[in-house]
Image: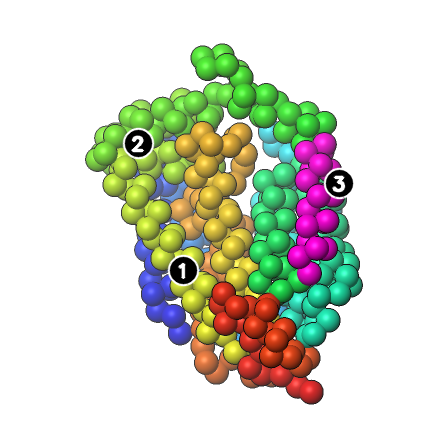
């Protein structure tokens, strides 16, 4: 299997242990807990994540092709449960029983779309395969995520779907028309939702006009500035002392930048770049279309999660609640990110996916749908 991918993921998890302990100690003490309170809870989640990585790396990825709808349904039902019974935190109901079901729904969504696209064969250019079939899980997911609301997660869903359609060779005309219809709708939803409107208004507010929504973003940028090149040193950051909210969760990249400096954040960027490149290498070398699409989708999901988190911390986009994969404190995202790595490792094995049977795709269609990554169907049934 791809050992470099495994090594990088484990290194990021280990770095997360140091970062969380350093950043969360003050918060724990201020709430009357021991300094190791959040570290101990994170270590429990980390052990589960490592176990998930090992288990998913052993499960033949062909299983996700036949169980995609079931996984999506479970995630969608649980996500609906958060809307009905979940407790709203900062204006959004995203958790139920300390689980964020949208992460499970995301995996089910990815597996379902990959299944439909890999089964399309020469019909990939048709309206049915290019738009209608992928639109079913997308519309369901979009409605549920908008009701929570969780717009940053919805953006990840849309980004993953777009990348998958392009990689699979779907009809560009239909993709373009869908984008023209989806973008105005998305902007209308964002601008009419009080939850997102406050953050957008704060993002475009004049410099120096401090608001509650602006507070977190401004202190994130301040933390990165304080770090300079070499950082203030482990445990020596000041912004985590009650100034930077969610310092060990949704803003941990900024907290790391303060204590580890530009060098520390650059190392994180390089590590994630290596992780993503290996994910796409696995996609290129997979012997099935489903394996290729699944590897691309999982890598893209992690990539978008990473990009949104970093862009928030450096002030490029409005503040939103997306953790930094493998490093931020949390349970569901950490476990699912580790599971994604496990699936990628399984796809990288040459002995897996043997039971997958896919419709024939002519050589011209195979070239057109995967010319940038050699995406041809090497195992097909006629």
The residue at the point 36 percent across, 24 percent down is 222
Q: Quadrant of residue 366?
A: bottom right
Disc 2 target residue: 258
Q: Tell which tag, 3 or 1, sits nearer the viewer.
A: 1
Q: In the rendered image of this protein, does residue 294 appear above or below residue 257? A: below
Task: Please tell me which of labels 3 and 1 falls first in the chain.
Answer: 3
The boundaries of the magenta stretch are 171-189
- The location of residue 163, given as percent across then percent down, is 58, 56
Where residue 277 is drawn, which disc sits there?
A: 1
Identify the main secondary structure in magenta: helix
358 vs 56, left or right, is right
Q: From the image, which quarter does the C terminus lie in? A: bottom right
Q: Is residue 376 shown left or right of residue 237?
A: right
Q: Which residue is mark 3?
A: 84
Q: Residues within 10 Å of mark 1 (few under 14, many from 20)?
A: some
301 up-or-down from 200: above or below = below
* Percent of width and height locating residue 124: 70, 68
* Residue at position x 62%, y 83% in the image: 380
Q: Residues within 10 Å of mark 2 (few under 14, many from 20)?
A: many
How far separated are the C-alphas under marks 2 and 1?
27 Å
Q: Residues within 10 Å of mark 3 (few under 14, many from 20)?
A: few
Q: Earlier in the sequence, mark 2 or mark 1?
A: 2
Q: Is residue 360 magenta?
A: no
Is label 3 in a helix, a strand or a loop? helix
Say whether residue 207 is left or right of residue 73: left
In front of the other: 284 or 267: 284
């Amino acid at each position: 299997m791809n050992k470099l991918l495994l090594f990088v993921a484990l290194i990021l998890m280990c770095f997360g242990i140091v970062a969380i302990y350093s950043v969360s100690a003050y918060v724990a003490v201020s709430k009357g807990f021991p300094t190791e309170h959040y570290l101990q809870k994170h270590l429990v989640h980390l052990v589960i994540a490592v176990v998930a990585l090992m288990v998913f790396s052993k499960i033949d990825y062909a299983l996700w092709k036949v169980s995609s709808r079931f996984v999506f349904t479970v995630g969608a039902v649980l996500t609906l449960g958060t809307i009905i019974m979940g407790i709203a935190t900062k204006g959004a109901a995203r958790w139920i029983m300390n689980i964020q079901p949208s992460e499970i729904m995301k995996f089910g969504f990815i597996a379902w779309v990959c299944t439909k696209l890999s089964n399309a064969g020469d019909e990939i250019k048709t309206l049915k395969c290019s738009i209608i079939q992928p639109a079913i899980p997308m519309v369901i997911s979009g409605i549920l995520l908008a009701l929570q609301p969780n717009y940053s997660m919805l953006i990840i869903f849309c980004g993953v779907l777009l990348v998958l359609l392009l990689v699979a060779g779907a009809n560009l005309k239909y993709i373009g028309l869908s984008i023209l219809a989806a973008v105005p709708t998305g902007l209308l939803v964002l601008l009419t939702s009080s939850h997102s409107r406050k953050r957008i208004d704060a993002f475009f507010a004049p410099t120096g006009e401090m608001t509650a929504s602006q507070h977190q973003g401004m202190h994130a940028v301040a933390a990165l500035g304080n770090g300079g090149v070499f950082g203030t040193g482990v445990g020596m950051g000041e912004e985590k002392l009650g100034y930077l909210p969610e310092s060990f969760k949704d803003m941990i990249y900024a907290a790391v930048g303060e204590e580890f400096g530009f060098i520390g954040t650059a190392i994180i960027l390089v590590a994630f770049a290596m992780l993503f490149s290996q994910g796409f290498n696995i996609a290129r070398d997979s012997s099935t279309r489903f394996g290729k699409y699944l590897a691309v989708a999982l890598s893209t999901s992690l990539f978008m999660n990473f990009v949104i988190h970093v862009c928030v911390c450096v002030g490029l986009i409005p503040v939103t609640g997306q953790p930094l994969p493998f490093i931020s404190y949390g349970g569901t995202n950490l476990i699912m990110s580790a599971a994604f790595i496990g699936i990628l490792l399984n796809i990288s094995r040459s002995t897996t996916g043997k039971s997958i049977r896919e419709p024939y795709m002519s050589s011209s269609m195979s070239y057109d749908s995967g010319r940038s990554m050699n995406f041809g169907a090497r195992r097909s049934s006629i």
